[in-house]
Amino acid sequence: MTAAKTTPKEPLVEINARPPDIQHMWDSTLRWFDLHGVEILVAAGFGFLIYLALGGIKRLAQRLRDRDGDAASFATVIGKAFSRTTHFFMIMVSARLVAGYANPPDLLLRTIQFLFTVAAVFQGAIWLREIILGLIERRTGEDNGSDTLSNAMGIIRLLVTVALFAIAVIVVLDNLGVNVTGLVAGLGVGGIAIGLAAQGIFSDLFAALSIIFDKPFRKGETINYDQTTATVERIGLKSTRLRAVTGEKKVISNANLLQKEITNYQHLDHRRIKFTIGLIYQTDPMLAERVPAILREVVESFDGIFIRCGLIAFGASSLDYELEFDVYLPDWDEIYKVRHKVGIAILKRFHKEGLEFAYPTQTTFTADPNGKMIMPYAPVTPARDAAS
């Protein structure tokens, strides 16, 4: 009878076995709780109080953001930024401030420090983004409701967010010990390539932002550029649409528009008006000397500001005077009416004073071959002289 072979038994594997690093952290954490239980409770209490204090600051920022008054004020911008504080950031700030008091294990302390760095970097990016966007909206002022600004703010928000969070990711990777030199160089080369490829688009986009922020003109205002006078109908991100005073609709790219000299008539507080007046050469010299004073009286009777008037030239068929005066009215239609009234008043006053306006005339003199002046036609002999 042969004995049955017995196979040596494999050692039982513990189901709850952990990797060595995790097991070490677990054991050190339990030992930490056993040795520093009181310190941990005190640190947790102070950490909770710090978290509540940060929550109170966040609620104060929310009230500052939602208060009545100027929505674009600097205080409102700060309130809007700090109201975006995340709970993760507040928890990590509390943990980081009290972690050293409880003497945590090295691995736990380094974990808290790393998570605090991540929370602080990304929270700083969020705060900075809100402050930048708030200051941009504050700079644009009362144009906040315009479609152009809404579209532009969407693009600005995207660009600012991408830039800030890209920097935040690079900072976090650098804290992890990753060599970010190649990444930064690659991002720089990629940005240059994109900028060169879309140079025309970015040129018009930045010109649109310049129009929004610098405000050389706004929607509904009448401007003059090049040799065209038109009313602004819409300011787009690529082009501006204008309605010429002659009725045509004109579309011009923002970059080309800003390269031209632009005259904005919207904020016109006064307009200088000039009249050129010609009097006949037969005007009495004493009366001609009184012309500037007469014109001053006419201008001031319509609340105009007399600037100057005087004889400027001896014309081919007239004594030429020039009158300059200012009309302080914001509406061009009203200025036009005042100019008309002043012109009619000058006509009436000159008629009353006996001043005659000149018009182009020529006088012809006839001479015989000897140079003696003669009549240009034969004299008419009376009928009775001919009968005798």
Image: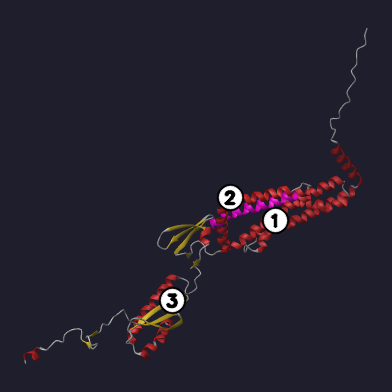
Indicate the position of residue 167 as horizontal and vertical percent values. Answer: 71, 52
The residue that mark 3 highlights is 273
Indicate the position of residue 180 as horizontal and vertical percent values. Answer: 74, 48
**Amino acid found under the numbered disc labelled 2:** Ala
Q: Quadrant of residue 290?
A: bottom left
Crowd band around label 2 with a 10 angstrom C-alpha radius: few (<14), some (14–19), many (20+): few
Q: Element under label 1?
A: helix
* Residue 166 located within the stretch drawn in magenta: yes
The residue lying at 86 percent from left, 41 percent from top is: 25
Q: Element under label 3?
A: strand
Indicate the position of residue 10 as horizontal and vertical percent values. Answer: 88, 23
Q: Which residues are magenta?
A: 146-172
Mark toward the start of the polypeptide (3 vs 2): 2
In this rendering, does residue 84 appear at all? Answer: no
CA gap between label 3 and label 2 equals 50 Å
What numbered label is drawn on residue 197?
2
